[in-house]
Image (spheres, grey):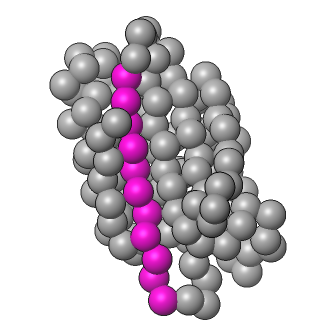
Amino acid sequence: MASVNQCALPDAVPAIRAAISDFLDGLGVPESQSADIKLAVSEAATNVVRHAYPGHPVGDIRGDRSAVDGTIIVSVCDWGRPFSAPTPNPGLGMGNPVMETLAAGVVRSQIDGMKQVELTFIRR
């Protein structure tokens, strides 16, 4: 699985999106599906930048991607506050519904301080 690591600052979102775009281009994913995947990944990365490290020095964000048997899996990871912690910056609340609409599957997990949002897409 290939990864891209960044500091969780606003510039990380387009950097992760560009890495995913290059990956999808290499797979020959049609632009209509590629646009959906990049939007869902951008939402996940934006959630990290906006919510993972409030009141703390900036932390890390990692984007992983793989493709197996017609399935594309993209994970966005951070080591910030838990998913269940209240956020001082709630935003509009549209990121999760967008991801859940565009991806075939969305799995949120937390293991040993690392949070992960795994987005699964079926190639069209």
Query: Residue at image x 21%, y 27%?
Result: 25
Please give the range of residues in magenta: 57-67
**Residue 53 to residue 122: above or below:** below
Quarter holding the C terminus is: top left
User: Which residue is at the far front?
Assistant: 112
Q: Quadrant of residue 48?
A: bottom right
Q: Residue at x 46, y 17 (%)?
A: 71
- Residue 53, quarter of the rendered image: bottom right
Residue 60 magenta: yes
Tell me: 51 left or right of 70. right
Secondary structure mostly seen in magenta is strand
> Would residue 17 be found to the left or right of residue 101 on screen?
left
Q: Residue at x 56, y 39 (%)?
A: 118
Query: Where residue 116 sits in the image (x, y, percent)?
Result: 58, 51
* Quarter where residue 123 is shown: top left
Magenta segment includes 112: no
Tell me where residue 72 appears, x and y as whole percent: 43, 24
